Amino acid sequence: MKTLSLDLRERILAAYDAEQGSREEIGRRFRVSTGMVKKLLQQRRKRGDIRPQHHRSGRKPKLLESHRQGLQQLIHQKALACTLPAIHYVLVKMGLTYKKRLSMRVSRTAPTLPGPARSGSADRPASIPPGLFSSTSPRPRRT
């Protein structure tokens, strides 16, 4: 999805401030979602600015600037003379992986259902009695 231009953001908020309709009506008028109108109002109220926030998206780095400086010093001192994969394996052993699900529990490998599903209970008769239609009647065996 493309980012809304600053001009469009300003026109949406100007229409809302001029009370030219509700959030839903303004969203339909400018062909944006009601949530986008709400987000713009909230962003203006909290930050005082309605520009896009591209710098806030994405994953936060685990290696901070101080870490990078330490690595640069090791490289310049020739104390760290190895390949990129070797550095990768050391970082993985240290727990600095690029795994996306850090805070979620591990997926279960066992089946979640106790057994195969059944169609109705054993004491309830079938909804279509056998033999009522030609498709449900027992077929004669071929000899």
Image (cartoon, rainbow, N blue to C red):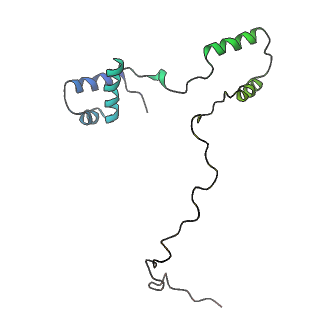
Is 66 drawn above or below residue 133 in the view shown? above
Name the residue at 52% across, 27% down. 58
The quarter of the rendered structure image containing the C terminus is bottom right
Of 109 and 130, the residue lying toward us: 109
Which image quadrant is residue 89 in? Answer: top right
28 in relation to 91, above or below? below
Query: Is residue 67 shown left or right of residue 18?
Result: right
Q: Residue visible at 44% across and 85% down?
A: 132
Is residue 30 shown left or right of residue 126? left
x and y percent of residue 122 in the render?
50, 76
- Residue at (49%, 82%) from the top-left corner? 136
Q: Position of residue 115 (x, y in %)?
A: 59, 64
Question: Quarter of the image containing the N terminus?
Answer: top left
Q: Is residue 66 above or below residue 84?
A: above
Residue placed farthest to the bottom in the image? 143
Left or right: 110 with respect to 118?
right
Q: Is residue 6 above or below residue 100?
A: above
